[in-house]
Each structure stands twice: as structure tokens, then as C-alpha cells.
Image (cartoon, rainbow, N blue to C red):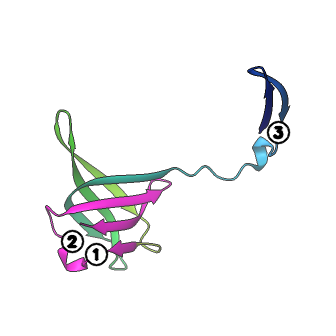
Amino acid sequence: MLIRSYGGKAIYVEVLTPANQRPSQQTDFSVTGTLNSYQLNAQGRIGSISINQAVSTGVQTAVYSVDSSKLYISGDISLLTPGRTVELRGNNQLVNTIIIR
């Protein structure tokens, strides 16, 4: 959508992409916490990962699905152990990057 304004008021609006032709919605995310555990899928790759995150009421455990076909791991894989600080990045509710701190 293109909007032109004058004096704080819209004077021209142009729709650049019709709603039915809009690309799929992508939501990027990045979370940091301590590794709780991870599970392997049938191919022996990481299929899900669980981390503990500090929140105002204490500690919260969150489980994330992993896009194992596109997973990138930064850091020493031997340090991917419970209690280690990790950053998870992804989009569309799937983790595609694990950064081991």
C-alpha cells in the first residue's frame, strides 16, 4: 500500500498488491535461554528443542519445533548440553538457527 499525505491527512492511497496475491505471512523470532533438552527425529536430526527462560514470575520452559532440513548450528556442538545458554532464531514458528553461547 502506498499512502501520500498532506498536512497529516491521507490524500492518495494506492494498493500495490491485492490481498489474495499477498505472499505468505512470515514471523521472525529470536529467543535466548538455557538449554533444557532436545529430541531427535526419525532421521537422527534435532526435531525439537526445549529451553528455560527467566520471566518475572520465575522460570518458564518453552518447546520449539526445529526445521531440521535447514538447521544451522553456530558454536561447538559438543557444548549443546543442559544448562548451556543458547539463542534460537527462526520464522513461521520453526527454529532454523541455534547459537551456542
Q: Are marks 1 and 2 in contact (CB under 8 Å)?
A: yes
Q: CA distance from mark 1 to mark 2?
A: 9 Å
Lower position in the chain sequence, tag 1 or tag 3:
3
Residue 75 shows in the view: yes
Residue at point 39% right, 54% down? 30
Q: Nearer the viewer, residue 88 or 46?
A: 88
- What numbered label is drawn on residue 63? none
SS category of the residue bearing label 1 = loop
Question: In which quadrant of the rendered view does residue 48 lie?
Answer: bottom left
Residue at image mark 3: 15
User: Would you say residue 100 sits in the magenta stretch?
Assistant: yes
Which-is-in-front pick, marks 1 and 2? Answer: 1
* Residue 26 picture location, percent across and down: 57, 52
Q: Which residues are magenta?
A: 72-101
In whole angstroms, how far apart are the C-alphas of marks 2 and 3?
Answer: 47 Å
Nearest to the observer: residue 33 or residue 13: 13
Amino acid type, callout 2: Leu
Mark 1 vs mark 3, CA separation in Å? 45 Å
Q: Amino acid at mark 1?
A: Gly
Mark 1, residue position: 75
Q: Quadrant of residue 9?
A: top right
Q: Which mark is residue 80?
A: 2
